[in-house]
Image (cartoon, helix red, strand yellow):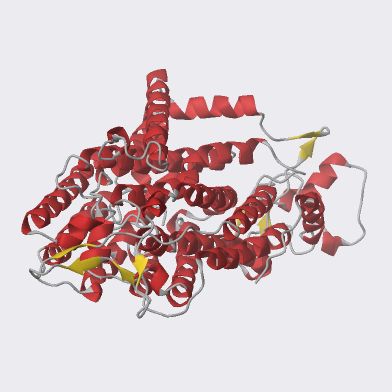
């Protein structure tokens, strides 16, 4: 799940409780988009006269021509069929205008399906592929804990490029469309990366396999009754995770490209909503994405729960086969994006597209980031995840070695968690749209840390070591986590102006998403200082009292950082009205823009260097990358 503001108790586990495919050739994209434009002409009604729930007019010369516009260009033209036209003075100006139900109106059912399918497919793949990380990287390959934490960051790295994807969306239309073509391109790229991943076999497993039970041999009992870590059969496998992480990242880049285009369209839809309903479109989109994640969690729970991947079944799909299954929805989304998504075609005036140039767009960007109101939101979106996600690297090892969580249980509780997360989004939509954001975030943050501390402490000190008990905490915290998440999306709409929706959405979410890899880099370096090492599985297997205390103190430090992040609420407005007031009344200074550029650039470079160094055998041992030092 993409957390834009505030942690999802990331110190527990960075991944959350989380046949052949025929690829569509890239050469077919243009014809698909062109045909889709023709298909859209019929279902798009012209908004003439009074606005109703079932009507929509689009910006400029849309696929359905506005009769007022025709009359203005052809003053001598006439039409005998008065039913097909309306008088010039009764027509609504050409602009994106949705009725009270917006994209969810009855006459736009095809568009609603295409719109929701984008988020459902993102949820499927975003929940499915990262859902394999627990079993593959921690169970099969047994990578060090700090590497495992970094895998999730790297595989989600493309979310940090949302600004650049939004920039291209807004300035480089393809055949008059700013969103649909990039959805097609993104899903095609995602499908290709997943197909490549399905054809990249894993090395032999790290641990030896018991010939009788088929389970891994992780520990041996000594003559004095004590337990020690067993010798692995293939220790080199712990260093082989890099190439699989890169392929996961490339797959993510594809669906992020599509998601950014969908986010831009979502913002356009949301801005057309009346104030009292604003936030409904976004909440529905993310609720749909969460439902997709729930479906993929169920799939991984039942079909990737073999003993090879820290499961309990004697059968199951391999990692490569799961990647191929995830390739199927990516392929299907290519024609769905082209034919069903409703987007007004960019109009033409005097033979030229009325779309801003790249230079004008950068000018808009510079103007935007000079705003003190926008500067404050960027600081909040960046600093909150930076501080709150400086989390211990011990979470995953506690989960697998002390709580004994298997892959089936992990995915099953992820399913329950996603259902509750969707319920939390619905609850915010129905009950808390006008609640103070500060009160909502403070209460949810404190609740998350208190509940997590209770469950984790009982597990660490062997009071209760049960997978269902340990995972129960994650389910309990999903509703406040959903409230925390959705607030950060509301402020984005308030910052956007007509024509720069992709820019605002991309820049603010990029600032937020850059915070997580930067925090992970700092966390790897900080928690490396704890001794005995928090990253070595053998320390958890031997389970000494002294090591339990070390792990407990590392969690306390994580909770401290999470609470400390509440200080960033100073930069966040309390509600939508205050956000609009700041936007309209606060001043602009070039120094704000310079600080934003320098801050985000430094965070990007630093986090990329540290996190990628922890992925490859030659550098993952370095202390700078979070390792214990190279021999």
Q: In this view, does 449 lie to the left or right of 299?
A: left
Q: What residue lies at 40% left-to-right and 33% top-to-bottom?
A: 609
Instruction: Please name whichever residue, 213 or 359, is drawn nearer the observer in this view of the structure.
Output: 213
Is 513 placed above or below 601 here? Answer: below
Percent x, y for residue 316?
48, 76
Query: In which image quadrant can residue 140 be found?
Result: bottom left
**Residue at the farthest top position:** 590
Can residue 12 be seen?
Answer: no
Q: In this view, does 310 lie to the left or right of 83?
A: left
Q: How many labels does the image show?
A: 0
Q: What residue lies at 21% left-to-right and 43% top-to-bottom?
A: 527
Q: In which quarter of the image is the N terminus?
A: bottom left
Q: In this view, does 252 lie to the left or right of 465?
A: right
Percent x, y for residue 25?
76, 54
Q: In this view, does 186 lie to the left or right of 411?
A: right
Percent x, y for residue 264?
56, 47
Q: In which quarter of the image is the C terminus?
A: top left
Query: In which image quadrant can residue 105 be found?
Result: bottom right
Instruction: Please name whichever residue, 174 or 63, is drawn nearer the observer in this view of the structure.
Output: 174
**Residue at the farthest front position:** 223
Instruction: Please name whichever residue, 622 or 551, is drawn nearer the observer in this view of the structure.
Output: 622
Can residue 311 be seen?
Answer: yes
Percent x, y for residue 197?
57, 56
Instruction: Please name whichever residue, 23 or 376, is drawn nearer the observer in this view of the structure.
Output: 23
């Amino acid at each position: 799940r993409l957390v834009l503001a505030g942690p999802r108790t990331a110190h527990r586990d960075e991944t959350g409780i989380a046949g052949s495919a025929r690829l569509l050739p890239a050469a077919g994209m243009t014809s698909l988009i062109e045909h889709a434009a023709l298909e859209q002409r019929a279902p798009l009604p012209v908004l003439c006269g009074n606005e109703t729930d079932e009507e929509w007019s689009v910006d400029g010369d849309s696929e359905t021509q506005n009769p007022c516009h025709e009359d203005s260009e052809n003053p001598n033209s006439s039409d005998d069929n008065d039913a097909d036209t309306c008088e010039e003075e009764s027509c609504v100006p050409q602009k994106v205008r949705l009725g009270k139900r917006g994209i969810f109106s009855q006459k736009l059912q095809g568009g609603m399906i295409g719109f929701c399918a984008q988020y459902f497919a993102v949820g499927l793949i975003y929940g499915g592929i990262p859902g394999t990380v627990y079993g593959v990287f921690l169970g099969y390959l047994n990578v060090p804990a700090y590497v495992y934490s970094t895998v999730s960051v790297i595989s989600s790295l493309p979310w940090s490029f949302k600004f650049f994807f939004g920039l291209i969306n807004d300035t480089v239309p393809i055949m008059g469309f700013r969103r649909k073509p990039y959805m097609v391109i993104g899903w095609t790229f995602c499908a290709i990366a997943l197909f490549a991943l399905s054809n990249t076999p894993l090395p032999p497993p790290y641990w030896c396999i018991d010939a009788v039970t088929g389970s891994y041999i992780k520990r041996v009992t000594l003559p004095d009754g004590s337990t020690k870590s067993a010798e692995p059969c293939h220790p080199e496998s712990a260093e082989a995770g890099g190439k699989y992480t890169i392929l996961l990242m490339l797959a993510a880049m594809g669906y992020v490209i599509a998601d950014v285009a969908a986010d831009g369209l979502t913002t356009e839809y949301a801005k057309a909503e009346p104030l009292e309903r604003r936030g409904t479109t976004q909440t529905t989109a993310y609720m749909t994405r969460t439902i997709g994640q729930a479906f993929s969690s169920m799939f991984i729970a039942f079909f990737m729960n073999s003993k090879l991947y820290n499961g309990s079944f004697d059968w199951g799909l391999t990692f490569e086969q799961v990647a191929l299954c995830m390739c199927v929805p990516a392929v299907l989304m290519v024609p769905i994006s082209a034919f069903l998504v409703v987007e007004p075609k960019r109009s033409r005036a005097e033979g030229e597209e009325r779309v801003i140039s790249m230079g004008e767009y950068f000018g808009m960007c510079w103007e935007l980031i000079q705003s003190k109101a926008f500067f404050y939101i960027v600081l909040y979106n960046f600093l909150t995840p930076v501080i709150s996600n400086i989390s211990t690297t011990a979470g995953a090892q506690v989960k697998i070695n002390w709580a004994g969580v298997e892959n089936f249980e992990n995915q099953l509780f992820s399913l329950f968690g996603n259902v509750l997360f969707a319920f939390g989004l619905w609850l915010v939509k129905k009950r808390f749209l006008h609640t103070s954001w500060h009160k909502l975030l403070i209460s949810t943050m404190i609740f998350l840390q208190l509940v997590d501390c209770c469950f984790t402490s009982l597990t660490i000190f062997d009071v209760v070591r049960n997978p269902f008990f340990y995972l129960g905490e994650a389910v309990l915290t999903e509703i406040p986590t959903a409230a925390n998440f959705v607030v950060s999306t509301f402020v984005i709409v308030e910052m956007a102006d007509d024509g720069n929706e992709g820019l605002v959405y991309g820049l603010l979410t990029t600032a937020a998403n850059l915070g997580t890899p930067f925090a992970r880099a700092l966390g790897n370096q900080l928690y490396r200082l704890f001794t005995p090492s928090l990253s070595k599985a053998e320390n958890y297997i031997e389970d000494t009292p002294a090591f339990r205390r070390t792990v407990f103190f590392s969690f306390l430090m994580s909770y401290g950082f999470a609470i400390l992040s509440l200080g960033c609420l100073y930069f966040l407005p309390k509600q939508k009205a205050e956000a609009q007031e700041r936007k309209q009344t606060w001043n602009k200074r070039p120094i704000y823009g310079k600080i934003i550029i320098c801050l985000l650039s430094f965070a990007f470079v630093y986090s990329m260097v540290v996190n990628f160094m922890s992925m490859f055998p030659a550098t993952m041992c370095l202390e700078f990358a979070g390792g214990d030092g190279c021999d």
